[in-house]
Image (tube, rainbow, N blue to C red):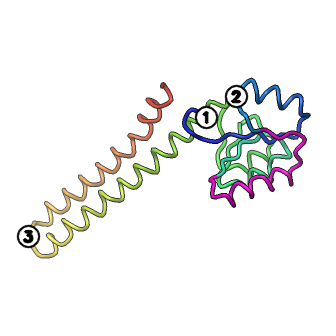
């Protein structure tokens, strides 16, 4: 919520229990007594509004909704069918893994784009130079190795960046 992400609770539980939990964790929008098809309808409505839906669920009746979201995540303690339907499974029951997963995913996306830029840059600069004979094959090979090392080092930044972000 602090990061500007809209949160909702869609639960099959009684309204009193859902309201108490939602209030405790600071989620303003909640729906109780939701059947699996109710959850899917809500997810489809959010998608129709142009929202990207991350579904988090652990129950047997969450599996269809997990499959309906753009992406989904489930704890390792969830029902097997929910874990199977989820795109990612996190250890334990603490929901703090959800924002950490988002941080890692965003960092991975950003660094993947940077890695593509490095690879394309190498191909645009050194391949034509090598083909035209302006650099020796050894220099081109060293440049290719250097670009591979740069891509690998860049990828390692995902773990470091996620660790720093989760410490905030």
Tell me where residue 13 sits by quadrant.
top right
Is 147 on the left-hand or right-hand side of 140?
right
Disc 2 versus disc 1: distance between alpha carbons? 9 Å
Relative to 127, residue 161 above or below: above
- Left or right: 122, with 59 as reference point: left
Q: Residue 27: where, in percent of width, then height? A: 71, 33
Between residues 53 and 71, which one lies in front from this camera angle?
53
Residue plotted at (66% across, 47% down): 54
Measuring from the top left, give residue 10's x and y in whole percent.
Answer: 80, 42
**Relative to 163, is 102 on the left or the right?**
right
- CA neighbours of label 2 inside 10 A, class few (<14), some (14 to 19), many (20+): few
Instruction: Quickly name the residue at label 1.
Output: 1
In the image, what residue occupies the spot 35% across and 45% down? 154
Name the residue beneath numbered marker 2: 26
**Element type at mark 1:** loop
Give how far across and how far down residue 19 sits, in percent.
Answer: 83, 30
- Counting from the top left corner in percent of width and height, residue 110 is at 42, 50
Nearer the observer: mark 3 or 2; the answer is 2
Magenta-colored stretch includes residue 39? yes
Q: For the point 30% across and 64% down, which residue is it?
A: 120
The magenta stretch spans which residues? 30-52
Label 3's element?
Answer: loop
Callout 1 environment at 10 Å: few (<14), some (14 to 19), or many (20+)?
few
Label 3 vs label 1: CA separation?
55 Å
Q: CA distance from mark 3 to mark 2?
A: 63 Å
Q: Earlier in the sequence, mark 3 or mark 2?
A: 2
Q: Quadrant of residue 74?
A: top right
Q: Earlier in the sequence, mark 3 or mark 1?
A: 1
Q: Residue at x 89, y 29 (%)?
A: 16
Q: Which of the two residues, 148 or 24, is positioned nearer the viewer here?
A: 24
155 to the left or right of 10: left
Residue beneath disc 3: 134
């Amino acid at each position: 919520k602090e990061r500007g992400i809209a949160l909702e609770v869609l639960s099959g539980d009684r309204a009193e229990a859902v309201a108490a939990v939602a209030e405790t964790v600071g989620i303003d929008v909640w729906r109780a007594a939701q059947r699996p098809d109710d959850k899917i309808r809500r997810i489809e409505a959010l998608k129709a509004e142009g929202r990207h839906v991350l579904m988090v669920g652990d129950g047997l009746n969450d599996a269809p909704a997990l499959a309906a979201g753009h992406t989904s995540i489930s704890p390792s303690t969830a029902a097997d069918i929910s874990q199977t339907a989820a795109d990612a499974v996190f250890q334990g029951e603490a929901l703090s893994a959800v924002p950490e997963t988002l941080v890692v995913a965003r960092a991975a996306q950003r660094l993947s784009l940077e890695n593509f830029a490095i690879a394309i840059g190498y191909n645009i600069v050194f391949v034509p130079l090598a083909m035209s004979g302006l650099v020796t094959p050894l220099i081109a090979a060293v440049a290719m190795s250097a670009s591979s090392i740069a891509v690998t080092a860049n990828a390692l930044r995902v773990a470091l960046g996620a660790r720093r972000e989760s410490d905030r």
